[in-house]
């Protein structure tokens, strides 16, 4: 019996929930973290302003042009029904040979938008145009 082919092998970015791959995507946007700051002017100091860090903000992560299994769909379905489950997930970058070269841990995320591709009866795969997730932080995984 031949082993099943990995459906995500053709994608450079693979998504893991609970240490299990649940999707592969060609593009990931929004891996951004920005520490905001305030300026403070000290009396008698005229050559500079003090810069004070306030908080770090994280933009939404957008996974584009991919393939995802039912777990990702069900997660968003639960959000639509009012059951928001924040979860950590991993975005893993793979090279052309399929070896993992980098990973990001996205903390306390949940999906807020799901966009599908055109439907094609000749294809058995569920292609995803994009999935957008909001979250509380990005770390090197």
Image (tube, grey):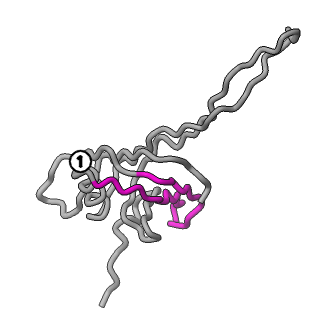
Q: Is residue 51 toward the left or the right of residue 78 in the image?
A: right
Residue 97 vertical placement versus 81 (above, below): below
Q: Quadrant of residue 25?
A: bottom left
Please state which of residues 6 and 37 is positioned toward the viewer in this rendering.
37
At which x and y percent is residue 91?
49, 57
Quarter holding residue 71: bottom left
How crowded pointer 1 is (Cα within 10 Å; few <14, some 14-19, many 20+) is rated as: some
Residue 4 or residue 52, whichever sits in front: 52
Element type where label 1 sits in the image: strand
From this viewpoint, which residue is outermost toward the left? Answer: 121
Residue ID at (62%, 55%): 140
- 63 w.r.t. 9: above or below: above
Stretch of the chain drawn in magenta: 83-109
67 or 2: nearer the viewer:
67
How many numbered marks have been drawn onto this rendered protein structure?
A: 1
Tell me what residue is drawn at x 66 percent, y 27 percent: 37
**Magenta-drawn stretch contains 102:** yes
Name the one closer to the observer, 6 or 55. 55
Label 1 belongs to which residue?
116
The N terminus lies in quadrant: bottom left
User: In terms of image quadrants, where is residue 57?
Assistant: top right
Q: Position of residue 2 (x, y in %)?
A: 32, 86
User: Horizontal and vertical percent for residue 111?
Assistant: 35, 49
Dominant secondary structure (helix, strand or loop) of the stretch shown in magenta: strand
Residue 105 colored magenta?
Answer: yes
């Amino acid at each position: 019996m031949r082993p099943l082919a990995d459906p995500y092998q053709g994608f450079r970015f693979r998504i893991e929930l609970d240490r299990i791959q649940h999707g592969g995507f060609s593009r990931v946007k929004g891996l951004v973290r920005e520490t905001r700051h305030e300026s403070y002017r000290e009396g008698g100091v005229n050559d500079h302003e003090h810069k004070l860090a306030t908080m770090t903000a994280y933009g939404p992560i957008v996974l584009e042009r991919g393939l995802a299994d039912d777990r990702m769909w069900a997660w968003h379905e639960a959000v639509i029904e009012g059951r928001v489950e924040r979860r950590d997930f991993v975005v893993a970058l793979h090279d052309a040979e399929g070896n993992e070269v980098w990973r990001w841990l996205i903390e306390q995320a949940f999906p807020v938008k799901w966009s599908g591709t055109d439907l094609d009866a000749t294809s058995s795969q569920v292609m995803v145009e994009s999935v957008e997730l909001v979250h509380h932080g990005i770390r090197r995984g």
